[in-house]
């Protein structure tokens, strides 16, 4: 989501998202080809080609690149200024005040229809059978158009569709899965949303003392033309919902952690550790399998008897996966949700992703030396904090190792090696355990 699901299209500018490596940037032709291929999947059997404005006679649909084909962030429906403007009016916590103001002004200008003529990079769609717009219109019971977002090339890359009425009313968000990793993530998110919507309603509890994050409702999860579709309600966001970006939503993280109950147990007796110790068997590369197995073994020897709290986590909680609206925190991209994980992993992930955006050196260069202090607001200090940082990095490394094995997992491989090197060069300190 890295793309996003039920929220705005926004993300890191200078650093990778979770699962996104910092390798060489594809050239313009590669970028354009990736977007054309995504559109071809959504309009099966249609002809999709790059055109300039005024060359779209007979087009079934024309999509304009924003801001352009060299730096694409979105494809928006050309000739429908209301829908194009609505696609821009989405805000996440990651956007600062200036960015929000700029996006709002751009959306207002696009709605007039005049600036659209300056969007020179377009895709023309002609012919073909039933399109994803047709299918979604049938599912949702009304005519719809879509804007298309596409994340950076990585194993969990998938198109994200903002579904709108032709006038620009938000109708749904759709994640499209066309790889093994993406399909698994969509299935996981469908299960997570079903589970969470039974337990979280986005309001304060009866005592009015604990903030609960609001999650989108699941509208549909199914297969169409070989693609898995996860259809979600659109979450309301607002340019006026801004809060200081440095303030992590600790209360909401704590509520989520406790959503299914909290278990206190030694690390080696936890389901989290069972999953971790079983994961090397799934790694195809023998060298990486052995290195990761060694790291797990040394961690188990150092921290296996350490008693920790285990609960739920989002799995990819970042400023660009959330937004405040009317005092309620709206959170999307639940595909990595899991239960039975150590307390503090969401906070570490949130802070690491922030740090990676502004880091001058390679990702993780400043970790884990200063990371344990991040956990002090949760009451985790000393051995518990050190162990939790290591367990978080182990989980991230496990995630990268498995995803990097996918056919388009190449961009992850450099970061996978960095994480393995980091874990090996920062051995645990068993003497600090109680």
Image: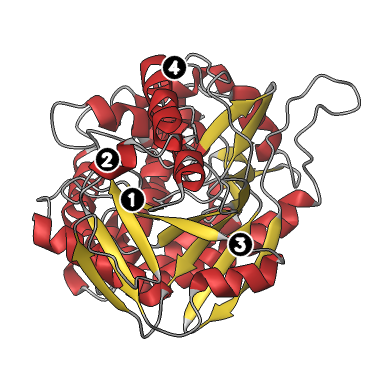
Labels 4 and 1: the sequence-earlier one: 4
Label 2: few (<14), some (14–19) or many (≥20) C-alpha neighbours in 10 Å: few
Whole-Å distance between the Cαs marked 4 and 3?
A: 31 Å
Residue 229, compared with residue 331, is above or below; it is: below
Labels 4 and 2: the sequence-earlier one: 4
- Give the label on residue 344, or none: none
Tell me the mark number nearer the camera, choosing from 4 and 2: 4
Q: Are marks 4 and 3 in contact (CB under 8 Å)?
A: no
Q: Nearer the viewer, residue 324 or 336?
A: 324
Labels 1 and 2: the sequence-earlier one: 1
Q: Secondary structure at mark 3?
A: strand
Tell me the mark number nearer the camera, choosing from 4 and 3: 3
Q: How many marks?
A: 4
Q: Which residue is mark 2?
A: 427
Tell me the mark number nearer the camera, choosing from 4 and 1: 4
Q: Which residue is mark 3?
A: 231
Label 1: few (<14), some (14–19) or many (≥20) C-alpha neighbours in 10 Å: some
Label 3: few (<14), some (14–19) or many (≥20) C-alpha neighbours in 10 Å: many
x and y, in percent, of residue 422 in the image? 21, 42
Whole-Å distance between the Cαs marked 4 and 1?
A: 34 Å
Q: Are marks 1 and 2 in contact (CB under 8 Å)?
A: yes
Whole-Å distance between the Cαs marked 1 and 2?
A: 8 Å
Q: Residue 327 falls in which quadrant of the image? A: top right
- Give the label on residue 298, or none: 1
Tell me the mark number nearer the camera, choosing from 1 and 3: 3
Residue at the location (50% across, 61% down)?
Answer: 175
- Give the label on residue 246, or none: 4
x and y, in percent, of residue 348 in the image? 44, 32
């Amino acid at each position: 989501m890295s793309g996003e699901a039920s929220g705005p299209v926004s993300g890191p500018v200078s650093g990778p998202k979770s699962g996104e490596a910092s390798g060489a940037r594809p050239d313009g032709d590669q970028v354009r080809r990736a977007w054309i291929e995504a559109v071809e999947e959504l309009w099966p059997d249609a002809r999709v080609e790059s055109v300039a404005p005024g060359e779209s006679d007979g087009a079934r649909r024309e999509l304009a690149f924003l801001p352009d084909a060299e730096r694409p962030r979105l494809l928006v429906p050309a000739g429908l200024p209301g829908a194009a403007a609505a696609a821009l009016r989405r805000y996440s916590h990651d956007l600062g005040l200036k960015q929000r103001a700029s996006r709002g002004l751009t959306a207002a200008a696009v709605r007039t229809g005049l600036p659209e003529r300056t969007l020179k990079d377009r895709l023309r769609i002609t012919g073909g059978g039933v399109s994803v717009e047709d299918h979604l219109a049938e599912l949702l019971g009304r005519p719809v158009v879509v804007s298309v977002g596409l994340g950076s090339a990585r194993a969990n890359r998938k198109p994200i569709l903002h579904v709108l009425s032709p006038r620009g009313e938000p109708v749904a968000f759709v994640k499209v899965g066309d790889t093994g990793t993406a399909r698994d993530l969509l299935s996981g998110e469908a299960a997570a949303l079903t589970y969470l919507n039974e337990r979280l309603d986005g309001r304060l509890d009866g005592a009015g003392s604990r903030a609960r994050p609001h999650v989108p409702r699941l509208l549909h999860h199914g297969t169409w033309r070989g693609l898995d579709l996860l259809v979600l309600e659109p979450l309301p966001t607002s340019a006026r919902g801004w809060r200081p970006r440095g303030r992590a939503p600790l209360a909401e993280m704590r509520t989520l952690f406790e959503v299914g109950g909290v278990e206190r147990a030694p690390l080696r007796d936890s389901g989290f550790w069972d999953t971790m110790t079983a994961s090397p068997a799934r790694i195809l590369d023998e060298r990486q399998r052995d290195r990761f197995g060694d790291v797990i073994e040394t961690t188990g020897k150092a921290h296996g008897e350490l008693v920790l709290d285990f609960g739920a986590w989002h799995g990819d909680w970042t400023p660009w996966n959330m937004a405040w609206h009317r005092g309620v925190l709206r959170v999307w991209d639940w595909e990595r949700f899991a239960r039975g994980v150590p307390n503090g992993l969401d906070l570490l992930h949130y802070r690491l992703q922030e740090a990676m955006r502004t880091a001058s050196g390679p990702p993780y260069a400043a970790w884990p030396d200063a990371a344990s202090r991040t956990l002090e607001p949760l009451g985790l200090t000393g051995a518990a904090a050190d162990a939790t940082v290591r367990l978080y990095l182990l989980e991230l490394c496990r995630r990268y190792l498995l995803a990097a094995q996918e056919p388009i997992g190449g961009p992850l491989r450099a970061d996978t090696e960095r994480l393995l090197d980091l874990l090996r060069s920062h051995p645990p300190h068993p003497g600090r355990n109680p």
